[in-house]
């Protein structure tokens, strides 16, 4: 696979997982400083890793959520909490991942993650209702 194919595959997965609106916003914010970085994450995070056949997207979502808790990456955690639904992850599964994170990443990290999940889910519910 060449870099153009990897980028195209990555963009397809990125859109499927994160949604067109998010990807379109990210693309619109590209600058001379960030363009190469955006291309890098599209090719490698999305086109190389998320397209691998060894794990389903559902599992990759749960793993990513757990890693964002461990790394204390609030914005990325919120993004992937929302995106997990696109991969068939239920809120109960997210709750279990956060419970697991409480033991392995620490209670304060999981406490923050639960608060973020509540915010994200409430916003998603408002969007669905309205």
Image: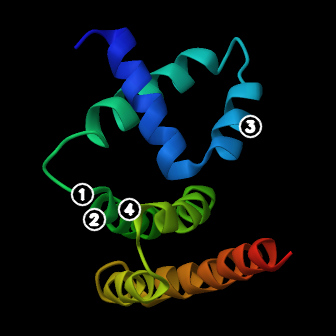
User: Which one is in front in this view, the residue at disc 1 or the one at disc 4?
Assistant: 1
Q: Is residue 95 left or right of residue 129?
A: left
Secondary structure under tag 3 reads helix
Q: Answer whether labels 1 and 4 touch (C-beta < 8 Å).
A: no
Q: In the rendered image, is residue 41 in sight? A: no
Rendered image quadrant of residue 58:
bottom left
Q: Disc 3 or 4, which lies upstream in sequence?
A: 3
Q: Answer whether labels 4 and 2 touch (C-beta < 8 Å).
A: yes
For marks 2 and 3, give the CA distance: 26 Å
Q: Disc 1 or 3, which lies upstream in sequence?
A: 3
Q: Where residue 39 appears, x then y in whole percent?
A: 50, 20
Identify which residue, 109 or 27, lies in the foreground: 27
**Residue 77 versus residue 13 in the image, above or below:** below
For marks 2 and 1, give the CA distance: 5 Å
Q: Where residue 10 appears, x then y in whole percent?
A: 41, 30
Secondary structure under tag 2 reads helix
Q: Residues within 10 Å of mark 4 (few under 14, many from 20)?
A: many
For marks 1 and 3, give the CA distance: 26 Å
Q: Which residue is mark 2?
A: 59
**Residue 110 versus residue 25 in the image, above or below:** below
Identify which residue is drawn at 65% across, 79% down.
121
Q: Which mark is residue 56?
A: 1
Q: Disc 2 or 3, which lies upstream in sequence?
A: 3
Q: In the rendered image, is residue 16 in sight? A: yes
Q: Answer whether labels 2 and 1 touch (C-beta < 8 Å).
A: yes
Q: Which residue is mark 3?
A: 25
Q: Which mark is residue 99?
A: none
Q: Which residue is mark 4?
A: 61
């Amino acid at each position: 696979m060449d870099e153009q194919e990897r980028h195209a595959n990555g963009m397809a997965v990125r859109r499927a997982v994160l949604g067109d609106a998010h990807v379109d916003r990210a693309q619109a914010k590209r600058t001379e400083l960030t363009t190469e970085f955006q291309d890098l994450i599209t090719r490698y995070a999305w086109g190389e890793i998320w397209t691998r056949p060894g794990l389903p997207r559902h599992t990759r979502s749960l793993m990513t959520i757990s890693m964002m808790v461990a790394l204390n990456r609030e914005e990325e955690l919120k993004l992937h909490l929302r995106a997990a639904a696109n991969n068939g992850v239920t809120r109960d599964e997210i709750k279990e991942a956060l419970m697991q994170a409480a033991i392995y990443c620490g209670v304060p990290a999981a406490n923050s993650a639960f608060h973020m999940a509540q915010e994200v889910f409430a916003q998603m519910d408002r969007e669905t209702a309205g």
